[in-house]
Image: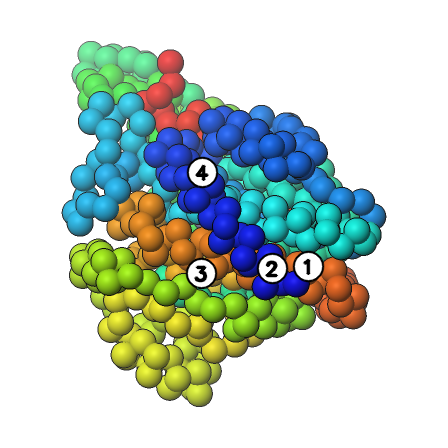
Amino acid sequence: MTKADLYQMLEEKQQLFFDTADAIWADPELSLSEHHAAARYTALLEELGFTVENRLAGMETAFSGRFGSGRPVIGILGEYDALAGLSQQAGALEPCPATKDGDNDCGHGCGHHLLGVGSLAAAWAVKEYLAASGESGTVIYYGCPGEEGGAGKAFMARDGLFYGLDAALTWHPGSTNEVFTGTNNTSMQVEYTFHGIAAHAAGNPHQGRSALDAVELMNLGVQFLREHIPTTDCLHYAVTNAGGISPNVVQSKATVLYMVRSDTVPHNKELLARVDRIAEGAALMTDTSFTRRFIDGTADLLPNEALERALYKNMAEIPLPEYTQSEREFAAALDSTCPRDEELPGMGAKYDWEIRKRVAELSDNGAAPLNDFLLPYFHSDKQSPGSTDVGDVSWQTPTAQITAVTWPAHSPGHSWQNVSGGTSGVAHKGMLYAAKVLAGAAVDLFTQPELLEKARTEFQAAAARGYTCPIEPDATPVPVEEMLYSKRT
Ligand SMILES: [Zn+2]
Ligand SMILES: [Zn+2]
């Protein structure tokens, strides 16, 4: 079976994949509560001939689908969680929630409905290839929950789930067709709940001890900490429970959720210990106590140039999607609602002058509403400020990923525009293109052992200092829903 046959098969089955992505888009679920999506995926995997394993690493919505036997073993990663506050009607050109009752206000602002299905389509194509070739080899689709919160892959990595792979591939929906490169910050989230004593704020203030005061003092302490940390470290917080809505009550319970980022997991642990001590100080100052709950953490990403090159080769070989006039018109209309900046698309344009010139031509100096081209190849180990749990996978096996165009050129991350365009022709076609690229690269890895060897040698050098799991030993996965104070009983 040739790679061209595989692409043809993916096209013949495309409607199933488009329908599945649309169904998940229409039923968005928060991180680690993706029960409907997980049920849909596992049923489909079984129907397509995979052997399914459920509830990986203690998470109800983590699963895998396996096909084949022996080495090499290639993992393909999928995600399917949505974001709170981004409910949006498909195809609308202004923010307009799809739900009125506020019951389910989430939406697929990061395109994980496409990510999960595109990866599944790729895994299916690889399975068909393995079945036809009859050669040794295994493909595993990993259903990874909680990317937006919960860090499903990091919990899976804590259980060592990715050590047995020869390589892992994935993709992310986006505004560019390019290989994802570089590294990123690690992250850790910890929830601090302060406990005080309730009292009438005017009548008995001397008897009260304010948990909200403690949260405010903790935040103030952290503001002073900012001057004394590396400039690439980040400290973010959200007050998830301010203690209630009554100013005339001394708030007896208040919660703040911290996200701490640094370049490596060991550095992040040191920074988090300083934040812990500020919490202790805030409790001392207010005569309150606090409980600490570790939520999640993610490691930095180890880029793998050998795999990035393999992915790029397939991106260049496979024809890019062709768009209809109406798809282009919708993309342009949606793009016109997006904020602009001076940046040219893609990572290469930031760091490489030659690439910058080429991208300026391709994108009409960054004005094109749809980046319907392949960006030049670019590899880097530059650190970006954000974090991803793909990083944890990359410490256990050589890992690489691409982005494919599913949104207009200027659509911001986690935006209503991304949700609005999530079921469009551009989104579907980008997903199918990504599936072809991942499947094509996986076939190269099965047929060219030297590629895997190169990737492994590079990985071993990069990971020589050893994986430090960012998840604390006694931590259990916390569904994001549980942290929404308004939904607590
Ligand atoms: Zn996201
Ligand atoms: Zn995402």
Give coordinates of residue 97: x percent, y percent.
Answer: 22, 36
Amino acid type, label 3: Ala
Residue at mark 4: 20
Look at discs 1 and 4 and give the one toward the viewer. 1
Q: Nearer the viewer, residue 258 or 251?
A: 258
State yes or no: discs 1 and 2 in contact (Cβ < 8 Å).
yes
Assign the N terminus to one quadrant of the image. bottom right
Amino acid type, label 2: Asp
Spatial separation of the CA atoms under disc 3 and disc 2? 21 Å
Q: Is residue 314 left or right of residue 357?
A: right
Residue at mark 1: 1
Q: Is residue 265 left or right of residue 172?
A: right
Classify mark 1: helix, strand or loop: loop
**Can residue 232 be seen by looking at this rendering?**
no
Spatial separation of the CA atoms under disc 3 and disc 4? 18 Å
Spatial separation of the CA atoms under disc 1 and disc 3? 25 Å
Amino acid type, label 1: Met
Q: Is residue 184 left or right of residue 98?
A: right
Look at discs 1 and 3 and give the one toward the viewer. 1
Q: Which mark is residue 5?
A: 2
